[in-house]
Image: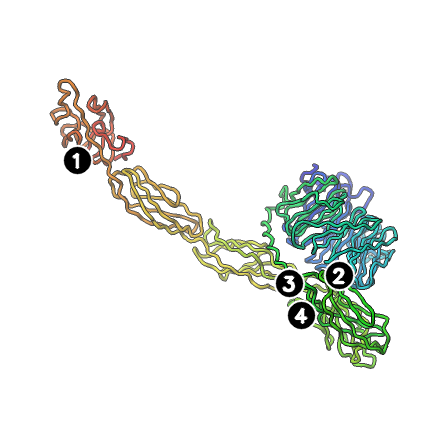
Amino acid sequence: MRGGLVTIGTVGALLAAMGLTVLGLGAADNAVANYDASSWLWSAARSEIARVNGVTARVDTRMGIPGARRHPMEVAQTDRLLVLRDLKTGQVSSLDLATLQITATTPTTPGLGVNVALHEDAAFVVDAVQGIVRQLDPRSLTPVGEPVRYPPGITGGAFDGKGRLWIAIPSEGTVSAVTPARLPAAPAGAASAGGAGPERVETYPVAEPSHELVVSTLDDGVAVLDRTSASLVTVRGGTTRRTPLTMSAVGTLPARTSGPAVPVTVAGERRVHVVADGAGEVREFTVPGAGDRLSPAVAWAGRFYCADEASGTVYAFDGAGQLVDTVTGKGAAGPLELEVRENHLFINAPDSSVARVVDDKHQVREVNKYANDVLGGDPPPAPPPPPPPKKPKVGKPGAPRSVSASAGNAQARVTWKPAAANGAEIIRYVVEGDGQRHEVGANQRAVEITGLTNGRSYTFSVHAVNAKGAGPARRSNPVTPTAAVPDPPASVTAEARPDGTVRVTWPAANGQGNTIARYAVTATSAGTNAPAGESTRTELVIPAGELEYGTQYAFTVVSVNDKGAGSAASPVSNTVVPFAPPGQPTDLTASTVADQPGAIALRWSPAADNGRPVTAYRVDVAGRVSEVTDTQTTVSGLGDGQNVRVKVRAVNEAGPGPEATTTARTVAPPRVTVTGSSATATTATVTFTVDAGGGQATCTLSTSGEQPEQGPCSKITMSGLAPGTAYTFTVTASNAAGKGTAERAQTTDPLYGVATCKNGSDGDQRTYCDKDVDGRNGNEIFSVPRQDNDKQVGWAKPGTRLKAYCKRSGQNVDSWIYNNQKQSTWWVQVEYEGRNYIPWAWLNLEGGDDIKILPTC
């Protein structure tokens, strides 16, 4: 069975015979779960997960996931566990690898901001927006003990090789390790969840507060990329090491790094910086190609693999930074997922049928994830990627917008809106005031400045930095710290609304003797903090489009009194995911269905879902409205040759989005136009053109008394006609919608023969052909096809040219020596005192004397 298709029934039978369970976590558990270096890979177009055997590079088990077609899916797996999280719906599902059934589900907030992490028997859900790290029992997906709580806006959430879950806390500039609790003997139910929970066991300072941090776990420890200061910090064995990097654009890391060297990918430069363990040596290499759609480079078996999602190409570099291999795959453009598992590198293209496996000898083999197609036909081919946008002119960033400061007790809070990047991604912001300089991450647009003196006035300036340098600064309003600060609102509630706006509400805060003048709202997502707006009331409606659809956000509120003093931040709100009606379907095409009357075929590319899954596409064809879930359909029941207007809208929870439109025409009955005709004595050819009406036409030529002749829809020849005869020919073209005809009159050419009788050389032979005599003679003409004296109508002098019409079988006649021994039972009807017959033996037809060309009378 190795490498072959293992059906659900086969797996179940094998396990029953072996007495095993997969999620039971017993002594012999998971014997078949992930053997032979396997990895489960997601196929979004098929809503299917396939187990790829790394040894054979073939799919051996496949499973459909209901309701997830074209959804991005997070796949977390170990040898024992398989847990999926649908980013569109937020549903987390635990799969029993023995039965290939979903055994437990739990909801999470949809969109980016939550991730699942697995290690051996431990499962975690990390809510980066709320800062909550919760352990789950993978058998029931119920909580194990109390969660570990951090400030909102954390990053990371992956295990290292020693079983520690690493979390970065940008607001503190620290990284922290969490260890899982032991699972109870039996799966915990919702009511009984509790007991010992996960523990926060290690914390290390890695950056200044509010720097932007990216995490990659190691075989033993963690690597943290400080994007704000352009440095990489590694934590191994309790020791931290900082390595400065030279980067003019934002860098990123893979979620997990194997081996001693950590690759830092700077997509905007198409460069990879490799930081070696120990000496802190940095090697750099450039990735071929253009554009910035690079996935984080992954270390594997002494090489570094970097994927270009625009071209579907994976570039492999050796330890010295030399390009040693280029891995390509047909139809693999789009997102590419690289993961090292079980001594193999798996490269998955979720939007196509293609995956590839790289072993530790760097042999690359392609995998068809749709092989042994047990789940239905192939999905429609993915549309070609759009052309890359033109590169904008690159310059220093603009000034930040809406720089605002509010005073607190010996501190001030400074917020601002983004500066224009001007073609180069912003790397960091710099806040200056009172002789202090604070660098914060590009997505950390709110900062607390502490250590100030109450009663003293302060003004702050903020400027942005990109690859071209520092942009102009913008100053805040002056503020005076004071101990007389208001209370923050006691709670905050957020609501994502179908029009794309987000409504944030809170109860009025206690001004502690002063009037509350305004409230400042901050939005927090995974690893980011940014001002969302201000309001003089107890609510703020954030306009549609200001927050990213499909991304999780939570909010805090600061009260500001009429003296300019601000409170501490409120408790964090619930998490919401902004959403709006979906975008317009793209690449809409409508074509005639050639073999079906009254039908058109439609195809389009998926619409942007704008934060909620697209549940249907509403198709309007000439007022006939239907809904489909796929991105193609055929609409029938229309009129023949009908021009129709087509409208397609995507529908999600917020309602229908904008329509894409085009026009189409159903197949029409064909139209025939005769362009000419010609004839020989016994054939006629008619030439014509056919407008097939968008269909596939077949054509025939017919005339009265003859069998129709089928041929190409441009020229048809009919044979076996009578010479010198006037015909009316009809050309008929047929398709799915009906028939079209046209007529053409054509007369066949006349066919002549020469009455032939040549005198002999002896006796009476010398005068045999000179005239008609009693008895038999050459060239005699009869009204019937036999030599009957009573039926003779005349005699043709040798050399007489007679018009021939047709042939008829009759009495055998032998011309003997007088016409080269010609003998035949054929008689030819000729024009002689009307239409009468002469033996073919005495008539030599012009053009080769071929009796076969004459039709039978």
Q: Residue at x 87, y 51 (%)?
A: 237
Residue ID for mark 4: 543
Asked whether, in this view, residue 83 is left or right of residue 278, the answer is left
Above or below residue 809? Residue 468 is below
Residue ID for mark 1: 832
| Distance CA(mark 4)–CA(mark 3) | 18 Å
Secondary structure of the residue carrying tag 2 is: loop
Amino acid at dot 1: Tyr
Instruction: Indicate which disc, 4 or 2, sits on the residue closer to the N terminus.
Output: 2
x, y (%) of residue 238?
88, 53
| 262, 549: nearer the viewer | 262
Residue ID for mark 2: 526
| Cβ–Cβ under 8 Å for marks 2 and 3 | no
| Distance CA(mark 4)–CA(mark 1) | 101 Å
Instruction: Indicate which disc, 2 or 3, sits on the residue closer to the N terminus.
Output: 2
| Distance CA(mark 3)–CA(mark 1) | 92 Å
| Distance CA(mark 4)–CA(mark 2) | 21 Å
